[in-house]
Image (cartoon, rainbow, N blue to C red):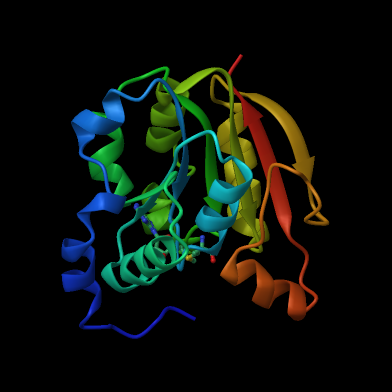
Amino acid sequence: MRPRFKAWAEPYLKAHSEITLSVEQINSLPNYYLEIGAGKGNFLCNMALKLSDKIIIGLEKNVTCAGITAKKIVEQQIANAKLIHQDAGVLLPLLKGESVLAIFLNFSDPWPKKRHHKNRLTSEKYLVQYHRLLKSGGRVYMKTDNVDFFNYSLELASFSKFNILSVDRNYDGLDQNDEMTEYEQNFRLEGLPIYRLILEKV
Ligand SMILES: C[S@@+](CC[C@H](N)C(=O)[O-])C[C@H]1O[C@@H](n2cnc3c(N)ncnc32)[C@H](O)[C@@H]1O
């Protein structure tokens, strides 16, 4: 389901610097939403339309996915959707704490092999970063089709400073604070259950 490499993506990103932000620009925002692993950008664009008075920043490390997302932002002229082509592990430590309203993790790579669990976006080092970045009352919304990754995330969250607000093993997709992603669309067509976890910084 990952798109094939598109040679146009990198030059396109360079030509559309208006849709990205520097670390300094991000750190001067009073608050913002963050999606980590934005994929092809449907969630980012649709949430930006919904949260029209707030900035939502998508983070995406894959150049082709970033290019596809950038094209959607540019073509739909969504001024409050921003995209950073960067790895979360590199960018997050550079961002100012107590700034983020909510973090969205949609169908993050499950990294099934145990030796790769450290790369999971709900591993301890990421939960520590999310807790630092979020404002008080801020939330992490996580959706996945992968039950093993979900159980792992729930367990790590239970050892973290987060309050576990909601654990849903058959999420219907109807929450107002949500939009459908490309992966989710395929999983729902296949009739697979979607798992959802909501954490809150108290
Ligand atoms: C399985 S895809 C899901 C895409 C999209 N969220 C969806 O639900 O359709 C995971 C995406 O997260 C991106 N990703 C994974 N780890 C990342 C990281 N550390 N920083 C930024 N992006 C990451 C991948 O490049 C990929 O596009």
Q: Is residue 150 above or below residue 52?
A: below
Q: How many marks?
A: 0
Residue at horizontal 54 percent and vertical 19 percent from the top: 161
Asked whether residue 60 is in view, the answer is yes
Nearest to the observer: residue 91 or residue 34: 34
Measured from the top left, where is residue 101 in percent x and y?
Answer: 53, 27
Q: Position of residue 96 (x, y in %)?
A: 30, 22
Q: Residue at x 37, y 69 (%)?
A: 71
Residue 188 vertical placement versus 80 (above, below): below
Q: Does residue 116 appear to the left or right of 168 in the view shown?
A: left
Residue at the image position 22 percent from the left and 80 percent from the top:
8
Percent position of residue 144, x then y: 63, 58
Give the side of residue 191 with respect to residue 24, left or right. right
Q: Relative to 114, say whether 155 is above or below.
A: above
Q: Quadrant of the C terminus?
A: top right
Residue 86 visible in this rendered orientation of the protein: no
Q: Which of the 4 image quadrants contains residue 69?
A: bottom left
Indicate the quadrant of ligand 1 in the picture: bottom left
Residue, far front: 77
Query: What residue is at 60 percent from the left and 64 percent from the top?
Result: 181
Residue 25 in picture, x, y percent from top left:
24, 31
Q: Is residue 80 above or below residue 40?
A: above
- The one nearer the camera, 195 or 13, is 13
